[in-house]
């Protein structure tokens, strides 16, 4: 039993298929690089991110480690775990569940990266580190609501840590580092300002969400929300079977994804699409390939099909396209489909 308030079930969210698929794909293939969800108020952005917590898989971490180091990833242990091994201790595993760690807009740099006690290091000769949000986020989802309103410097810190998988802190010539591998999810309302193109590119996938236009589905959204507010526990119980189906689907997909090898056709198609759209750098190609694999695994397939590449292109490329000031990025998907059909479907 838990005293925590029930969270709206992921499986009860009406529509917003791209948003849900992007979140699930990142759980299956974490190195995709996270998700940026853009949309007007009231489109279930925050609801979906918080709801995903109930579906997250468990993981094995080092017991009594402040950073919850991955027990199986001995190459990326924190300084403390390495010191324990050097002193002859045999590290033990413990199973914990992934969780969603939220970063408040008001967070300072020290709150994000952590702080070093300089006086303690000088007088005692031993580094004393106070973990920050990036330590809590290791192995978890780091969620930033209204990410476009964060100070650019803080966003840079987040994205650098996400890219390297390590958080480096240096003060007065004293440095400390620890693993910080997390899935970064940001939500924002474009009406309140956009992110710099350089920062947009660091998010693996980007989803634009809108309010439901179909009257019947819109009414269903209201109906479900009112039912949840009247009886949160009872409402969640009614969706538990669907939640469990998604959990099992995630587990199967994670296993499948490890066995899907990107063949020459997939690689050639990813490159052809990026070149056609004039996307800078190679991060887009890599993200497209990883995303296509994740979407195939989500559908229970052991190989990538054309529709997986179409979905991956739609979510991984628009926010990376070159554009002039005041020009919205647009993609002509008939052209994209023809490139995929020619490149992927050819001999």
Image (tube, rainbow, N blue to C red):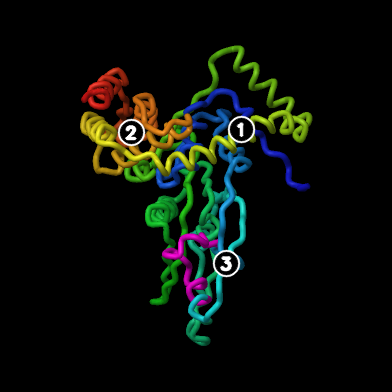
Residue 103 in sight in this render: yes
The residue pinned by badge 3 equals 65
Q: Residues within 10 Å of mark 2 (few under 14, many from 20)?
A: many
Residue 195, given in percent of the width and then of the height, sits at 39, 41
Q: Tell how many labels.
A: 3
Is residue 182 positioned above or below 195 on the image?
below
Is residue 234 positioned above or below 160 on the image?
above
* Residue 43, disc: none
- Dot 2 or dot 3: first in sequence order is 3
Q: Residue at x 54, y 41 (%)?
A: 251
Mark nearer the viewer, 2 or 3? 3
* Residue 245, disc: 1
User: What is the distance, in whole Å, between disc 1 and disc 3 at their CAs?
Assistant: 32 Å
* Residue 317, disc: 2
Q: Which residues are magenta?
A: 68-84
Is residue 96 positioned above or below 276 on the image?
below
């Amino acid at each position: 039993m838990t005293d925590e308030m029930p969270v709206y079930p992921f499986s009860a969210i009406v529509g917003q298929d791209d948003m849900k698929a992007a979140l699930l794909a990142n759980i299956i293939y974490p190195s995709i690089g996270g998700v940026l969800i853009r949309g007007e108020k009231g489109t279930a952005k925050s609801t979906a991110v918080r709801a995903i917590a109930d579906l997250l898989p468990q993981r094995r971490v080092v017991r009594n480690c402040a950073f919850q180091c991955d027990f199986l990833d001995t190459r990326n242990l924190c300084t403390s775990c390495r010191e324990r091994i050097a002193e002859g201790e045999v590290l033990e595993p413990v199973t914990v569940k992934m969780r969603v760690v939220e970063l408040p807009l008001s967070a300072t740099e020290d709150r994000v990266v952590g702080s070093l006690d300089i006086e303690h290091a000088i007088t005692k000769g031993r580094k004393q580190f106070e973990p920050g949000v990036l330590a809590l986020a290791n192995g978890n989802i780091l969620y930033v609501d209204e990410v476009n309103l964060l100070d650019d410097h803080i966003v840079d810190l987040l994205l650098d840590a996400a890219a390297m998988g390590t958080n480096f802190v240096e003060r007065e010539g004293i440095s400390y580092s620890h693993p910080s591998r997390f899935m970064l999810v940001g939500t924002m309302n474009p009406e309140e300002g956009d992110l710099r193109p350089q920062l947009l590119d660091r998010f693996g996938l980007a989803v634009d969400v809108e309010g439901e236009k179909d009257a019947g589905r819109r009414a269903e959204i209201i109906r479900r929300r009112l039912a949840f507010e009247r009886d949160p526990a009872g409402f969640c119980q009614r969706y538990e079977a669907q939640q469990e189906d998604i959990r099992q689907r995630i587990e199967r997909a994670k296993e499948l994804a490890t066995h899907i090898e990107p063949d020459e056709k997939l690689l050639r198609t990813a490159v052809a699409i990026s070149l056609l759209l004039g996307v800078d750098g190679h991060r887009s190609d890599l993200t497209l390939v990883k995303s296509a694999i994740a979407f195939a695994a989500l559908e229970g397939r052991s190989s990538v099909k054309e529709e997986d590449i179409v979905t991956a292109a739609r979510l991984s490329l628009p926010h990376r396209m070159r554009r002039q000031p005041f020009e919205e990025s647009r993609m002509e998907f008939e052209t994209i489909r023809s490139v995929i059909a020619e490149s992927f479907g050819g001999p």
